[in-house]
Image: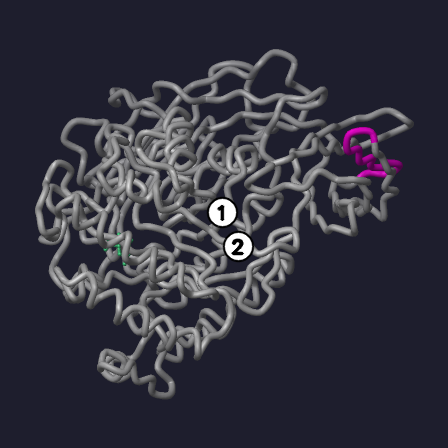
């Protein structure tokens, strides 16, 4: 999927601004052609903390805006693109239904060429933010104990972040030529000092078209077999892409007719390879270690809305602390975030919106289909980013059987046979195969807290493990917790050899709360816990990554383990001020002290 852009042959306008919203609690209204008397709402941004009294509203809301067709677009093919609407969106233009899309965080597009007027276009969305057991991420099963937290949560999520709703990323209107480039897929290899760039292109059907690919002076023609073509360019003495030197090349694809370009699209590409070799993760053939974070798209007032300044701020914080990597926990991040990862040189574990899954309860078929849809959409969206080095199929699915869990929780981590529920194993077998078929070039991971009883780790290339010893377990006893974890990691590695990433570890910390000796929730405790984890992880050669949970404090549902409805495991506060641990981690990761 190509992000809209302005070029010689393409135009795009952003429909962000003040729209109208009508909350339809009784679900009685049909407003396909528009409505009167709504409230004002800024798009993009979640509605929850923006509109007074609507924080916990997760029902139906109708959005509307008006727009005119930009001058000169008539005669082109015209589309509308929604970069992210959470959770389910149904869309109408001038009363004509365009379609629907399920799942927040991934883009969807409708062609509107035949429905759009020159002026006075009414765009209407019906957004459904309800949590339900057959959606992904799922809500709770009615009448059942909360699968994730034991105690009830409000709103009743199966995951540990606030279920923000609404139009959370830009809505773009764009046009392309009648016969246009529709897709580009780039794969890079390294041959000695040369970069080998394979480009596959697709265009709308048409006779007599050829495709030209140019990378800074190197150009080849691709003559079509129908609408699909492929070509390979060799770049001598290529400047490779890496965190130390995020070199990018501009690849321009032109669709030619009668010797002249009728469409042109420019993509920033990075020449790099990513491979698993035994216990190592190799970037451009060299071992690489990931230092970084799990994060959230989360900020006061805007909720999960796109805020470009916050993206810059967070990359600045990650740079300052010596991070080179992050995971898009627990859903795909904005396309702007991904573009900057390419430009600034961050290694990204790109995660689908599958979090808090369960496998015995009703709705499994639907949930599994949605997971597959998300894998397709994510790879389609992000396949050309050099920063994306791995696909994460899910975070913390609840996979083990109760018997396996009981045996594993013993002092020796006893692993019994068939430790995962068969339905979970089947689901991840299929999902891993799908991801590999769609992208054979990148490793796959599954982020789990289950430990060595996670049978679905057999399908992945890299183990991503979340664990909170010294916090949820061995509370108050950091050393005991870290020792036990060290042993558990060895047990996991013996069962699932290969590169291992500690994808979450941390401690809730109230900024300004101090204790000596360190005590849970104090700044000292977080700094000490992270130091001991990092020392232990550094001692194991197969550990190729350490991602602290979390970069910043973030909003959650209400519940007894979340004071003020926040997860306080950030090493920065929600408004991005450093806690003591931020300085400690910076010293450990960069060798620099506060005064440097
Ligand atoms: C992990 C989850 C993460 C939570 C974290 C925590 O993956 O979403 O926020 O625990 O409890 O299990 O802080």
Q: Position of residue 576 (x, y in %)?
A: 28, 31
Image position, residue 464 (x, y; %)? 41, 62
Quarter of the picture containing the C terminus is: top left
Q: Indicate the secondary structure of the residue bearing disc 2.
A: strand
Residue 365 point in image, percent of width and height: 41, 67
**Left or right side of 497 for 588:** left
Residue at 67 percent of width and 27 percent of height: 176
Tag 1 and tag 2, C-beta contact below 8 Å: yes
Q: Quadrant of the N terminus?
A: top right
Among numbered discs 1 and 2, the one appearing first in the sequence:
1
Q: Is residue 253 above or below residue 15?
A: below
In the displayed structure, 251 sits above or below 288; it is: above
Highlighted magenta segment, given as a residue range: 206-217
Q: Would you identify the image quadrant in which residue 546 lies?
A: bottom left
Q: Residue at x 52, y 49 (%)?
A: 378
Camera-side residue of 325 and 68: 325
Image disc number at residue 390: 2
Q: Is residue 390 left or right of residue 207?
A: left
Rounded to the nearest whole Å, what is the CA distance between mark 1 and mark 2? 7 Å
Q: Which residue is mark 1?
A: 348
Q: Is residue 424 left or right of residue 227?
A: left
* Label 2 Cα crowd, 10 Å radius (few <14 / some 14-19 / many 20+): many
């Amino acid at each position: 999927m190509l992000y809209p852009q302005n070029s010689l042959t393409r135009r795009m306008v952003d429909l962000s601004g003040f729209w109208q919203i009508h909350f339809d609690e009784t679900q009685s209204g049909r407003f396909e052609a528009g409505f009167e008397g709504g409230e004002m709402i800024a798009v993009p941004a979640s509605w929850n903390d923006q509109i007074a009294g609507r924080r916990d509203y997760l029902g139906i809301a109708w959005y509307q805006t008006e727009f005119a067709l930009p001058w000169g677009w008539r005669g082109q093919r015209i589309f509308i693109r929604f970069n992210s609407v959470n959770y389910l969106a149904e869309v109408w233009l001038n009363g004509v239904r365009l379609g629907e899309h399920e799942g927040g965080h991934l883009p969807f597009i409708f062609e509107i060429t035949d429905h759009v007027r020159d002026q006075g276009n009414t765009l209407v969305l019906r957004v459904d933010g309800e949590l339900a057991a057959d959606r992904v991420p799922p809500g709770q099963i009615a009448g059942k104990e909360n699968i994730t937290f034991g105690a009830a949560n409000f709103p009743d999520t199966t995951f540990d972040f606030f279920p923000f709703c609404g139009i959370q990323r830009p809505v773009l209107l764009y046009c392309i030529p009648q016969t246009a480039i529709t897709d580009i897929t780039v794969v890079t290899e390294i041959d000695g000092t040369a970069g080998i760039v394979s480009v596959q292109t697709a265009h709308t059907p048409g006779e007599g078209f050829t495709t030209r690919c140019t990378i800074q002076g190197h150009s080849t023609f691709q003559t079509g077999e129908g609408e699909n073509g492929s070509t390979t360019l060799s770049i001598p003495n290529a400047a490779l892409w890496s965190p130390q030197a995020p070199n990018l090349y501009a690849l321009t694809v032109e669709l030619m007719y009668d010797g002249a370009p009728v469409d042109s699209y420019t993509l920033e590409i990075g020449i790099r390879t990513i491979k698993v070799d035994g216990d190592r993760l190799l970037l451009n053939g060299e071992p690489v270690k990931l230092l970084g974070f799990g994060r959230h798209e989360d900020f006061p007032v805007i909720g999960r809305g796109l805020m470009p300044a916050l993206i810059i701020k967070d990359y600045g914080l990650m740079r300052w602390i010596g991070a080179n990597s992050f995971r898009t926990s627990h859903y795909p991040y904005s396309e702007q975030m991904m573009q900057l990862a390419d430009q600034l040189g961050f290694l990204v574990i790109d995660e689908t919106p599958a979090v808090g899954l369960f496998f015995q309860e009703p709705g499994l078929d639907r949930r599994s289909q949605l997971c597959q849809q998300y894998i397709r959409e994510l790879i389609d969206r992000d396949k050309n980013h050099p920063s994306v080095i791995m696909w994460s199929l899910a975070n913390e699915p609840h996979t083990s059987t109760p018997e396996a869990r009981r045996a594993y929780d013993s002092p020796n981590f006893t692993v019994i046979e068939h430790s995962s529920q068969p339905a979970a194993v089947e689901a991840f077998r299929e999902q891993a195969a799908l991801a590999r078929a769609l992208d054979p070039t990148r490793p796959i991971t599954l982020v789990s807290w289950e430990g060595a009883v996670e049978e679905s780790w057999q399908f992945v290339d890299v183990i991503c493990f979340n664990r909170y010893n010294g916090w949820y377990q061995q509370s108050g006893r950091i050393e005991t917790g870290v020792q036990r974890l060290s042993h558990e990691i060895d047990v996991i590695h013996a069962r699932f050899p290969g590169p291992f990433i500690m994808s979450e570890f941390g401690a809730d910390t109230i900024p300004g709360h101090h204790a000596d000796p360190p005590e849970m929730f104090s700044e000292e405790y977080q700094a000490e816990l992270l130091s001991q984890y990092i020392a232990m992880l550094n001692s194991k050669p197969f550990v190729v990554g350490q991602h602290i949970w979390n970069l910043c404090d973030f909003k959650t549902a209400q519940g007894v383990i979340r004071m003020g409805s926040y997860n306080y495991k950030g090493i920065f506060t929600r408004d991005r001020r450093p806690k003591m641990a931020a300085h400690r981690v910076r010293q450990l990761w960069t060798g620099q002290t506060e005064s440097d």
